[in-house]
Image: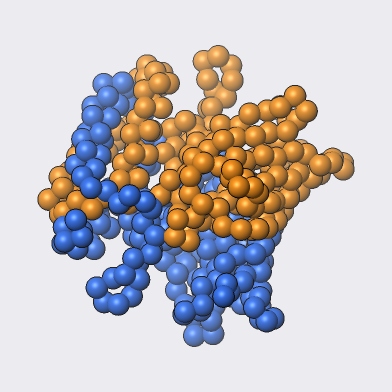
Chain colours: A orange, B blue
Amino acid sequence: MTASDASVPDELYAELTDSVRRLVDVAIRSQAGPTAFLAAKTKIDDAVAELSRAPLADSFGIRPAPDGTSRAWGNVAMGLRNPFAPPLVVHHDADGGVWADVVLGAAYEGPPGHVHGGICALLLDHMLGATAHKPGRPAVTGTLTVRYEMGTPLGPLRAEACVDRIEGDKTFASGHLATAEGVTVRAHGVFFHPA
Amino acid sequence: MTASDASVPDELYAELTDSVRRLVDVAIRSQAGPTAFLAAKTKIDDAVAELSRAPLADSFGIRPAPDGTSRAWGNVAMGLRNPFAPPLVVHHDADGGVWADVVLGAAYEGPPGHVHGGICALLLDHMLGATAHKPGRPAVTGTLTVRYEMGTPLGPLRAEACVDRIEGDKTFASGHLATAEGVTVRAHGVFFHPA
């Protein structure tokens, strides 16, 4: 099974994930009739059958890559193989700050036309964690406080975060989400580095 | 277009959504080879084409149902047509408290084998909001504070929330996530009722 896994190019994993993202979007927004829905369901179930030979017994976890790095391809925020992930592609600045540009569509809706507040919290938890994380010293969230200053419309967003200070084994980080009109949500959090 | 939309039974929407959920799960966990991935991608793209006739121009929003209630079927936490939604089925107790049982699989992963902290925040934001929400008085989140007491393993979870007190236009709510072993994450939040 590992041999066949290794032979799928990363690009094909990414392309399949993108196809599933498009499917999720249109499954929500389609106004097609029952004939099209039934036909689509058959095709989806066939695709599930194609992929169902020898799945992993568990979730993806973190697995070694051939180049010595590690892969968290199932991660719901940034995993290459997780269609729920927008995905967040986190960029690291020289000063330790992080940022990501993301476009959130209909699948992330809470209030009409707006990003669900819990998705805002997901993005911010991930970004604050990414800035608190150091190589070989993974960070886990202790507390996260999210302040909603205004609704966050669906569409393009920028997420940013940085470390405010480090005290012993605690890292204090903060960040925000912003549209072209300004900041919509702010967060701060305390992260720990488990021994 | 509205006529064809109305003719799809709710059950078929729910079944298609479930099929997409299974697809998301196996897209992450499959160990099939490139031939199966290519074949699956073709079927998925065909399903997208089936459903792509006349999609809504925007997100689903909140739309009236024939029985006079309203539908938030695109909602990422509980929407009938959103495959990202576990879905959260919120039960209301007589005393105003809310609870939901949910099973989270590989698609919600953060740390290996565990629910992403941001997904915990999403569930709690939604549950706290559900208890603060009153008919005709929708609640929006002002602040949400999430305290991670231990890792939340993937699998079955219970989410609970209740209103602690109401002060003017602010509703203070709290809640938690728990496994059979006990509480893993606690949250409290302040909600507003926009005029």
Query: Seen from this angle, which residue lies furthest bottom?
Result: B94
**Nearest the eye: A111 or B164:** A111
Is there any visible trace of residue B120 in the rendered image? no
Q: How many marks?
A: 0
Q: Residue at x 56, y 42 (%)?
A: A157
Q: Residue furthest front?
A: A181
- Judged from this view, the residue extending furthest toward the right is A167
Measured as percent of width and height from the top left, residue B43 is found at 22, 33
Kindly indicate the quadrant of the structure image that contains residue A131.
top right
Front residue of B132/B193: it is B193
Looking at the rendering, in which quadrant would you find the C terminus of chain B? bottom right
In the rendered image, the vertical position of residue A34 relative to residue A11, given as above or below = below
The N terminus of chain B sits in image quarter: bottom left
The one nearer the camera, A96 or A73, is: A96
Residue, x 49% and y 85% (percent of image)?
B94
- Give the vertical position of A16 relative to A66 (above or below): below
The x and y percentages for residue A165 are 84, 41
Q: Is residue A181 rendered to the left or right of residue A166?
A: left
- Compared across the picture, whether B39 is left or right of A178 comes to left
Residue visible at 44% across and 37% down in the picture: A82
Left or right, A83 with reference to B133: left
Q: Is residue B67 visible?
A: yes
Q: Is residue B146 left or right of residue A165?
A: left
Q: Where is residue A49 in the image (x, y as percent from the top left)?
A: 24, 37
Q: Residue at 23% x, 47% y: name it.
A: B54
Residue furthest to the left: A35
Q: Where is residue A113 in the image (x, y as percent from the top left)?
A: 45, 56
